[in-house]
Image (spheres, coloured by chain):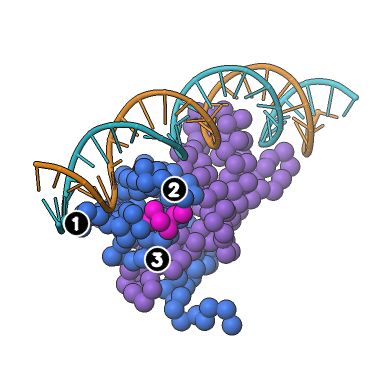
Chain colours: A blue, B purple, C orange, D cyan
Amino acid sequence: MRMNEKQALDAFAALSQETRLRIVKLLVAAGPEGMPAGVIGEEMGGASSSRISFHLSHLEQAGLLQSRREGRSIIYSAAFPALSGLVEFLMRDCCHGHPEVCNPAVAALSSCCETEKVPAHV
Amino acid sequence: MRMNEKQALDAFAALSQETRLRIVKLLVAAGPEGMPAGVIGEEMGGASSSRISFHLSHLEQAGLLQSRREGRSIIYSAAFPALSGLVEFLMRDCCHGHPEVCNPAVAALSSCCETEKVPAHV
DNA sequence: TCAATATCTCAACAATTATTGAAATATTCA
DNA sequence: TGAATATTTCAATAATTGTTGAGATATTGA
């Protein structure tokens, strides 16, 4: 998803608050299936439901999450294309003929896909 | 550069302001050599020098830029390892056995290194 | 329909962050 | 040394953003 400056600003603002950053990381780890708002609230510890609701809709407004209703619950999940787009926006035009400058970023991102292969704490 | 939550929050907060995001993108495109504060200010249009100075030190404080003095000028440049670290922090643990979820992000980032090969608007 | 569950909206207040302009610091060159 | 250049610091004010708690909306099953 190609992003413009306004969208990137909204996304970065949304990610610059502790509870919201934790929610995004929780849902990134949860994968495409997502989690109900109530469960997300429990994982966040002592935040009121109205506060969690506010943060969830802020994140959805910023395009970083999407939601669907399932019975009484609203299920939120990470918007993976938007996250990719944000990464691409930030690093766009980073090389100008010197790929070694941004290749470490590519390597860092690639390594996230290998989590399960790495032993926890040998 | 492996990042903790506090560092990531500071970085996202720094990136969530229009002038600062533009400064980072200007310096990402400028590469490791960077640019003097005064030139950055000119590129940002009508912002006062104190405002630019404030934003530059905010970004340096957040670890996204570094500075060095050269004569009367202070040269700012992008902290590429921190940018990579931020990308890695955001997407850490994203797959859980399903690499197809975050591979688009890897592809988006890889493509930034090919800017010069792509014709502008065919 | 009614009670229970899950989540959201709203308004008042608190906290954080941005902007401005004047003055201070550091460097260079005559 | 003193004037000119480049940049930073500071304090006051303006603007934005976060929090709280009460009440509203939507859904389910008895």
Place residue A27 in its image quadrant: bottom left
Q: Nearer the viewer, residue A79 or A71?
A: A71
Residue at 51 percent across and 41 percent down: it is B20
Q: Residues within 10 Å of mark 2 (few under 14, many from 20)?
A: few
Residue at 37 percent across and 56 percent down: it is A40
Position of the C terminus of chain B by quadrant: bottom left
Protein chain holding label 1? A
Judge whether residue A43 is colored magenta: yes
Residue A118 visible: yes
Q: Nearer the viewer, residue A60 or A68?
A: A68
Disc 1 on helix, strand or loop? loop
Disc 3 on helix, strand or loop? helix
Instruction: Decide which of tag 2 and tag 1 comes sooner along the chain.
Output: 2
Residue numbers of the magenta segment = A40-45
Do badges 1 and 3 share one subunit?
A: yes
Do badges 2 and 3 share one subunit?
A: yes
Residue that label 2 marks: A47
Position of the N terminus of chain B by quadrant: bottom right
Query: Label 1 is placed on what type of residue?
Result: Gly
Query: Label 3 is placed on what type of residue?
Result: Ala
Residue that label 3 marks: A29
Q: Is residue A65 left or right of residue B73?
A: left
Place residue B116 in its image quadrant: bottom left
Residue that label 1 marks: A71
Separation of residues labelled 1 and 3 (CA atoms): 24 Å
Residue A95 visible: no
* CB-based contact (under 8 Å), mark 2 and mark 3: no
Residue at 62 percent across and 36 percent down: it is B53
